[in-house]
Amino acid sequence: MESFTSLEEYQKMSLLRFTTAGSVDDGKSTLIGRMLYDTKSVFQDQYDAIKETSERRGEEGVNLALLTDGLRAEREQGITIDVAYRYFATPKRKFIIADTPGHIQYTRNMVTGASTANLALILIDARNGIVEQTRRHAFIASLLQIPHLVICINKMDLVDYSEEAYEKIKSEFRGFAAKLDVNDVEFIPVSALVGDNIVNESENMPWYKGTTLLYHLENVHIGSDHNFIDCRLPVQHVIRPYSDEYHDYRGYAGRVAGGIFKKGDKVMVLPSGFTSKIKKIDTYDGEIAEAFPPMSVTMLLEDDIDVSRGDMIVRENNVPDVEQDLEVMVCWFNDRPLQPRGKYALLHTTQDVRCIIKDIRYKVNINTLHRDEDDKFIKMNDIARIVIRTTKPLFVDSYRKNRNTGSIIFVDEATNETVGAGMIIG
Amino acid sequence: MKYHINHLRELEAESIFVLREVAAQFQKPVIMFSGGKDSIVMTHLARKAFFPAKIPFPLLHVDTGHNFPEALEYRDNLVKELGVKLIVGSVQEGIDTGLVVEETGYNASRNSLQTAVLLDTLEKHKFDAAMGGARRDEEKARAKERFFSHRDEFGQWDPKNQRPELWNLFNGKKRMGEHFRVFPISNWTELDIWQYIALEEIPLPSLYLSHKRKCFIRDGVILADSEYVNLKPDEKIEEMTVRYRTLGDMPITGAVLSDAATVQDIIMEVATTRITERGGRADDKRSETAMEDRKKAGYF
């Protein structure tokens, strides 16, 4: 409790964003409900409300899954439609859960939730083992380069807490994951319904020597999830106060997308290529010596050069690729399929340009990871490798190197909808 | 772990990023300012985002005419200090001109009238982005809200058809007549807000701290006595020691019995309390999906 009430302790907490994925009925809502309940993140009035609903529906006990229900249609149909964000904290960390639906038609939601996550939690029903959805979720987690993966093998109570069942799924998953680009994978046998190994250690599985899910979430090392090597500051907004006190002030406001900028560093501005030195890194609370991700700062340069939104401040000896032709892995989000030769608006860092789809190289079969070079019909929830050309050069890194400078979204120019998400291949 | 910022500073950096995106992507943005702690924190973050320049947005207050006087006084002082323009959308004026019709009966409130007046004011001033201090942890429908939330020309929210929001790429593109609601503090929790208020020493309206007030109890909610309420025969006015956890309209905002006289006391109370902050809002108790319904109609 002290960590929540003492400001000093509260400021020691770090932030972990994670996404949850599972197929229908594998107990994802129950797991989240259980985590919220066992960490005492559920308020009395919320609990009373779900208790009443459980009783009205004639359910046995209080259905913790109801804690995650949101929209009317979701409650009526007993499903999750859209990404919902949930919050809880322990004395060590604050957690943001991007709770994404497991239905096949909503894969775009998992991609959305995964885009900002440090960790992905994938649920597998111990009775069913690895299913098509599991493969899809693991592939998306690797495609989106989520640094940490946790596989929760759920409903262990329904397989008599069998170590054999757990080991079988574990080895099957490892075999599949070998083909994927994932580094840190953890397996935890749980029962969300009963509460085994979620927050409290299970007495039913003495053979399991690992940690509980919550312990893992609290302790997984996230300090190196940002890129601290390649300095990138996409300029968001130019601050010009027009007041007597700050007459010549020109501050380049932005969120550091990579690297560590220091006062006095020699920098280059793209696309102009002009060089200068960092005169000052400013914030409302005063000048700071260094800026690094994910800080929002205002940078002032020694020389009076022309810098505006969409430009990028980088180190002279470490520049991103300046490119108009890009190879991209795209996940399509819209009812209207990707149009070969089609033109789209494209957002990248603080740039807003247009692009043309020049080629569709292949579509990925998410279940087999097979590349199909003949199927160029890219519809909603499909993942494909494409080639695009932009109207203006972008300042990019590969997505693997930097999620901030390697990601793009496609916008339909007729409807303004976000129709696709792209990861740049370096 | 030298290159690490704590979670409050990370939330702050995220909110500042969103506020700067609004300034860059929209022609005529506005901050919806209610005088409540969330809009106060949002306005404080806007000040940080554009320092040393002034906040490049006016503040918009939808005045139901049923406000706590303390909240209005706080609003006027803040506007003066920031040097920004204040725009007031008046529900009373809406009633007078026939835009909206006043509710009647014991549970009459002007809360639902706010939506029409808000939309009317946004339209009149041609605002294309209205920033609100809503948080996703507040309520189940809000848990599904985007940072940049697209609204059609009727100001409606279509929760099943929201734009996916990835990485930190915010799509603010829209057609003529459409606008956006933007929620820069989406990811903050109630406790984050209070800890940040303590950290930054942000002044608040006195209503948030414990005080003596003449109140009565209706449906389990402690309400302030004011000229805007009609007492039922069995309702009695009593003096109570209370404070507010949220500030809405006087006739519908529930107080809590509390001795918390400082921000630190409030933090203690929030950390141990077992009732959500909106638990005291009669407007959410109208039905299980009251917030979803109001949001679809254009409430923020």
Image (tube, rainbow, N blue to C red):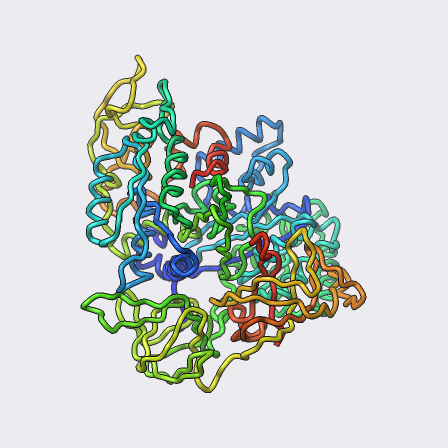
Residue A355, percent across and down? Answer: 60, 67
Query: Is residue A77 shown left or right of residue B284?
Result: right
Residue B280 against residue B27 in the figure, above or below: above
Task: Please tell me which residue lies in front, B117 or B282.
Answer: B117
A371, above or below B295, in the image: below
Q: Compared with residue B211, is residue B43 higher up or lower down, i.e. above or below?
A: below
In the displayed structure image, the side of residue A310 where residue B236 appears, left or right: left
- Asked whether the viewer can see residue A1, the reply is no
Residue at the image position 35 percent from the left and 75 percent from the top: A290
Name the residue rendered at 52%, 79% in the picture. Answer: A320
Judge left or right: residue B221 versus residue B291: left
Looking at the image, which is closer to me, B148 or B200?
B148
* Screen quadrant of the C terminus of chain A: bottom right
Q: Quadrant of residue A313?
A: bottom left
Find residue A217 and report its horizontal and vertical position in percent: 52, 58
Q: Quadrant of residue A360?
A: bottom right
> Which of these two is toward me, A8 or A398?
A398
Please provide percent x and percent y for residue A228. Answer: 46, 75
Report x, y in % for residue B196. Answer: 32, 54
Q: Is residue A335 above or below residue A249?
A: above
The front one of A283 and A342 is A342
Q: How many marks?
A: 0
Residue B31 in the figure: left or right of residue B166: left
Q: Is residue B36 visible?
A: yes
Residue pushed farthest top?
Answer: B233
Residue located farthest toward the right when viewing the structure as drawn: A374
